[in-house]
Amino acid sequence: MTKMHEIAALGQSLWIDNISRSMISSGRLRSLIDQGLRGQTSNPTIFKQAITSSADYDSRIMELAEAGKSFFEIYDDLTIKDVQDAADLFKGVYAQTKGLDGYVSLEINPKLGRESEAQFKEGLRLWKTLARPNGMIKVPATKNGCLVVEQLIAEGVNVNATLIFSAEQYQQVAWSYIKGLSRFAQKGGDVARVRSVASIFVSRIDTAVDKWLGEEKASLKGRAAVHHCAIIFHKFGQTFAGADFKALEAKGASVQRVLWASTGTKDPSYSDIKYVTELIVRPTVNTLPDKTLEAFLDHGTLKTAAVFKDVADSQRGLEALRRLGMDVNVLCLQLLEEGLSAFERSFEELIASIEEKTKKLCARSP
């Protein structure tokens, strides 16, 4: 029994927010799975780091370039291969947990984020190309994105709805999941095999609120994000206790679990596992950056999954901020726009880095 097994016994699954060819080929991912790791998430920033900081992908890049593939096609090949190989390593987890865990997420091209039809078609293409029952397609939870979530779920695709900041966003995502499942069931689909998570971005809220509070109101720092998470989790409980979902549950459907994302601690004055220990609640997922996972395995302590019992306290905490002039809901809209722009930039930088690397490799080739 490791700490990851212990936290799973409390009803929370730990995933890792990182992927690379070396992580897979060196046996490190296999070792983490043996220690209780239950899933994996990725994004363009993570892939950019993996591809540009090592020679692990060079021979494949050369093969594809010599075959006349575009830079996007090279990116597509490299990232899909990593996710497929990682998903294969997680097959045992997927089987042992009966489909609860063992998922590896791959993001739709963020440049399509404002076009629902293009996003849907790309999500469906990635799902079919992955050809893994424990793959997950990441979709940003914009208004367009929520429609895409519904459409993909209606096709039996596993979805990771990402970049969720506000409680309103979360509610729209949860409804999209339920509507998509209903459509899938009406077509005769087996709802028991469809899984989804709703990824709530955590630390960025504290970073923004703490900066706004300044030193004069330091006693209020470091609380807004977890208060906000408690309110979202309360909505999760209400939504999946409703009649619409219960009818689907009777057919074997599973809840769309809340996934805590962006859980690395940004402020060095806080515990480096703040957003692990303060967010243990059943049934959720927490996807951790490498450093945070290592810190938790090194010195994390587990008590009980008793977080969020008093949602009224969290509501009072956010109301106190509102009285001071900080509306977290308004902040969430701003963070969403910033997140979308950052994801688009990361993707552009990833493609540009592949182009640069390809040209260098081709220049060296005899």
Image (spheres, rainbow, N blue to C red):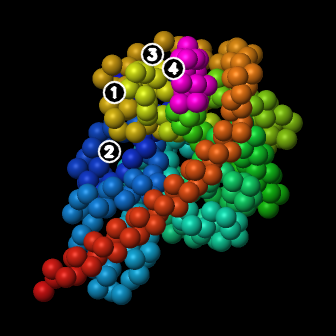
Would you place residue 213 above or below residue 365 in this image?
above
Work out whether mark 2 precedes mark 1 in sequence or the reverse, and give the earlier one.
Answer: 2
Q: Decide: few, some or many residues near mark 3? Use Cα within 10 Å; few <14, some 14-19, many ≥20.
A: few
Q: Which corner quadrant holds the C terminus?
A: bottom left
Mark 1, residue position: 295
Work out whether mark 1 precedes mark 4 in sequence or the reverse, and give the earlier one.
Answer: 4
Q: CA distance from mark 1 to mark 4?
A: 28 Å
Q: Amino acid at mark 2?
A: Leu
Give how far across and how far down residue 293 sits, in percent: 37, 32
Secondary structure of the residue carrying numbered label 3: loop
Q: CA distance from mark 4 to mark 2?
A: 42 Å
Mark 3, residue position: 302
Work out whether mark 3 precedes mark 1 in sequence or the reverse, and give the earlier one.
Answer: 1
Give how far across and how far down residue 276 sits, in percent: 47, 26
Secondary structure of the residue carrying numbered label 4: loop
Work out whether mark 4 precedes mark 3 in sequence or the reverse, and give the earlier one.
Answer: 4
Q: Is residue 249 magenta?
A: no
Q: Between tags 4 and 2, which lies in front? A: 4
Q: Amino acid at mark 4?
A: Glu
